[in-house]
Image: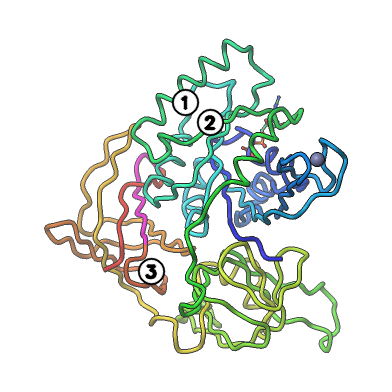
């Protein structure tokens, strides 16, 4: 079975994203802090989970055996959770995660004043990408008194005013002792998503890529490179031909080359699939050289059918809006200004080469990408030594 939905966990660092993911899925996704210490690239955490339904108790649960009556349950839904890093320096990673999300759990800790800096920033990400399916989770309620929890709830309500999550439900939980997780699971089980374009041309955004071979493997036993991400439109079967674009440079300094390959395996965590469509985080086995896919080398590429992926480009033009931020005044964009561009799972630096009245900007990218019309783009600019989300728009 394939997951039908990707749910992101967003919120300020230490507000309990990884702990909640573990409570919901049994998996520990926190590789961020370890990776940061070692100074290597920051990956998103992934974990799949099933939601079950007990027909007797008429309740949803994350347990295969109903905790209410001990009876058998039915699978209601499979979900892929994406744990986005909350650290301030990892904002662009969180923005790029948003491009493959259908819904979000937005975590706010009950034992800290709301909002914290990345509470604000992650909400801006949801606001600008337009992810409407949001459940606000008030975490760590075991650490505060009832009065404090209510006071914090009021702060959360106030903070949500005017944001995309203004009317989202707020569910208090404690991941440490499982308090109220059943209410959260019920909320997750009820999330509705729009119909997906399963018959459209294939389009998948790559959010990870790796080499699954162990060092020292014999050459005959080497497995091809593996890429991971989400199909946003269309569908794919094992054995089919694929193209990944812009691909990767074969030599340092040379432009990247699109890679054409074949699907040798299709899976979602431990589940093998014959065919896959939108929803869930997939891993695809290919015939390409694993040296090209190792260490997330293909993150930011788009996967489609050969000849159907748009041309690679070093320049994009967008219709943009300057962001209104509650925590700082955002200045107007300027020509020749450096920006970080986030589009689908691509993150790259660019320079604004042209601004046209009416809110159009042309940006020259250092590393090329592939874009489709109307695609969502986020621009961050340097303020006080940090890249801050400052404008967003769509490709024209
Ligand atoms: P993240 O940075 O948002 O992923 O936060 P973590 O999941 O790593 O949690 C940060 C800290 O808060 C850890 O020390 C957790 O043990 C603690 N924590 C998370 N959830 C709870 C909870 O429900 N109750 C209590 N008391 N502590 C929690
Ligand atoms: Zn039951």
* Quarter of the image that includes the C terminus: bottom left
Q: At which x and y percent is residue 99?
A: 47, 58
Q: Is residue 137 magenta?
A: no
As rendered, which of 372 and 51 lies closer to the eye?
A: 51
| Helix, strand or loop under label 2 | strand
In the image, taking residue 46 as reference, residue 69 lies left or right, namely right
Mark before the other along the chain sequence, 1 or 2: 1
| Residue placed under numbered mark 2 in the picture | 170
| Residue placed under numbered mark 1 in the picture | 156
Residue, x 56% and y 42% (percent of image)? 105
Residue, x 31% and y 57% (percent of image)? 338
- Are circles 1 and 2 on residues that touch, CB within 8 Å? yes
Q: How far, Cα to Cα, is label 3 from label 2?
A: 42 Å
- Are circles 1 and 3 on residues that touch, CB within 8 Å? no
Q: At which x and y percent is residue 125?
A: 42, 46
Question: As displayed, is residue 353 above or below residue 236?
Answer: above
- The mark found on residue 366 in the picture is 3
Q: At which x and y percent is residue 201?
A: 47, 80
| Helix, strand or loop under label 1 | helix
The number of discs equals 3
Give the residues in magenta.
Answer: 376-385
In the image, taking residue 34 as reference, residue 305 lies left or right, namely left
């Amino acid at each position: 079975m394939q997951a039908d939905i990707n749910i992101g966990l967003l919120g300020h660092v230490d507000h309990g994203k990884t702990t909640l993911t573990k409570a919901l899925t049994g998996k520990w996704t926190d590789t961020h802090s370890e990776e940061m210490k070692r100074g290597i690239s920051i990956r998103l955490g992934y974990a799949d989970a099933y939601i079950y339904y007990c027909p007797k108790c008429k309740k949803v649960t994350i347990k295969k055996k109903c905790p209410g009556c001990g009876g058998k349950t039915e699978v209601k839904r499979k979900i892929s959770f994406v744990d986005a890093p909350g650290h301030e320096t990892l904002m662009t990673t969180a923005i790029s995660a948003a491009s493959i999300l259908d819904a979000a759990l937005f975590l706010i800790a009950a034992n800290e004043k709301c909002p914290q800096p990345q509470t604000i920033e992650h909400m801006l990400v949801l606001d600008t990408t337009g992810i409407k399916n949001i459940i606000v989770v008030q975490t760590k309620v075991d650490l505060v008194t009832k009065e404090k929890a209510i006071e914090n709830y009021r702060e959360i309500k106030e903070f949500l005013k005017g944001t995309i999550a203004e009317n989202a439900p707020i569910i208090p939980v404690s991941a440490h002792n499982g308090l109220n997780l059943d209410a959260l699971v019920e909320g997750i089980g009820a999330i509705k998503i729009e119909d997906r374009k399963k018959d459209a041309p294939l389009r998948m955004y790559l959010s990870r890529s790796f080499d699954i071979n162990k060092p020292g493997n014999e050459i005959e036993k080497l497995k091809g490179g593996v890429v991971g991400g989400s199909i946003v439109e269309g569908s794919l079967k094992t054995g089919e031909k694929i193209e990944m674009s812009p691909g990767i440079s074969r030599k340092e300094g040379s432009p990247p080359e699109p890679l054409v390959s074949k699907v040798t395996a299709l899976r979602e965590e431990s589940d093998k699939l014959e065919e896959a469509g939108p929803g869930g985080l997939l891993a695809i086995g290919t015939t390409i050289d694993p040296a090209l896919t190792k260490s997330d080398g293909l993150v930011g590429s788009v996967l489609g059918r050969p000849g159907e992926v748009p041309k690679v480009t070093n320049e994009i033009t967008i219709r943009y809006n300057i962001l209104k931020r509650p925590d700082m005044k955002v200045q107007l964009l300027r020509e020749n200004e450096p920006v970080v561009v986030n589009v689908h799972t691509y993150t790259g630096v660019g320079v604004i080469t042209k601004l046209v009245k009416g809110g159009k900007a042309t940006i020259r990218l250092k590393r090329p990408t592939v874009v489709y019309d109307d695609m969502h783009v986020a621009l961050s600019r340097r303020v006080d030594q940090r890249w801050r989300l400052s404008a967003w728009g769509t490709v024209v």
